[in-house]
Every structure is written in C-alpha cells, then in structure tokens.
Image (cartoon, helix red, strand yellow):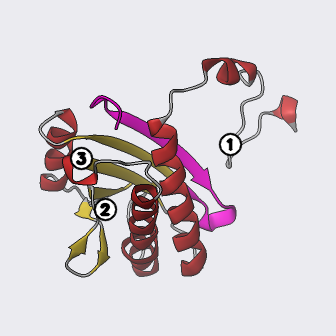
Amino acid sequence: MAGGVTEFGEAFAGSGTEAAHLNTILGLKGGPVEIAWSTALATPREGHAGFVVVAQPNKPVQPMTLFVNKAMIASERHATLTWGAAQLGVASGVLDAVADGVISNPTDCLLIAAVWVDPSAEDADLVYEFNRAATRASLERGAEQPDIEALLDVRDAPINGYYIPPSLR
C-alpha cells in the first residue's frame, strides 16, 4: 500500500456461470477499513455472512481477509461453491498478490473481498481458478492509479460479462 491510502479494486475473470466478479478494499489496520471489516463480520444478514478467508483450516491469509458473498446463498451446492472453491480461490489470489509484491505489508492491512458466485455455477475447479485470478487482478488494479484517459476512451463502448448494448452487438 502506497502511503497508507485505501485501495479499491475490481476484476472479472472467466466465463459462463463460473465466472468470478470481485471487488476489493484494502486498508491499514486502525483506519476506516478496519471499522468496515469489523462491522461486516459482526452483522451477518440472511443469506450473507462474512467470514475470514483461510488458506487451510486455522491458517488465515495475510492480510486478514473478510469474504463477503454478493449473491444470496441459494442452495446447498451454491453454499459449497461459495464457502469452498470461491473462498480458496480468494485465499490463493491474496497470497499470489503478497508473493508478487502487490501487497508489501500484509500484516499491517485488512482486506474486504466482495465475491460473486452465480447460484447456477457447477464446476468447482473453474470457480476456484476464476476467483483466484480475479482476486489477484483486483488487488493489482487497486494498487494502481486509474488511467482516466483509457476509461474515457471506452465511455461510448461499455460492456461487461452480462450485457452488451445493442449498438455494440
């Protein structure tokens, strides 16, 4: 983290129902991200319960990461994919970012990962792979300054994995 500034990231990886869409917020302990992190952990709501991301049982990743599911848990299979494959994908993506130097002070930070797992997803291996890639990419984008000119260049051609405007089809 450069200068203790909160970093906001976003990434989409993969395709189909197993595609991953993540939003990340990385900030220093003792700052506003800590308040948000603690509040989200302490206030679960129906279908959404934040939890600490672990690489293995009893081995939480660093920075301490709160997994927040964006899709309400819809079935037993969806729960297993969310808490299993997607959570481990996030864990691996966070550790990839630390290993690659994207996060240089992991024990001083807290991370919130808001994660989309499609309720109709089926392939756990793809859910894992795509969430790992999206987590790493979101953290890297959060560490970079946005390229405003590049964003302005695409303002008339907006697309995402779920919709393409008629003028671009």
| Label 2 packing within 10 angstroms: few (<14), some (14-19), many (20+) | few
Q: Name the residue under label 3.
A: 109
Please give left or right for residue 76 compared with residue 39 in the image: right
Give the SS element for disc 1: loop
Mark 2 vs mark 3: give the one in front: 3
Among the two numbered marks 2 and 3 on one chain, the one whose residue lies closer to the N terminus: 2
Quadrant of the image occupied by residue 168: top right
Where residue 47 is drawn, which disc sits there? Answer: 2
Which residues are the magenta region?
Answer: 1-21
Give the SS element for disc 3: strand
Q: Is residue 133 magenta?
A: no
Please give left or right for residue 43 compared with residue 26 in the image: left
Residue 60 on image: x %, y %: 24, 69
In the displayed structure, would residue 109 be above or below residue 126?
Answer: above
Residue 145 on image: x %, y %: 51, 27
Q: Name the residue under label 1.
A: 160
Amino acid at circle 1: Asn
Amino acid at circle 2: Gly
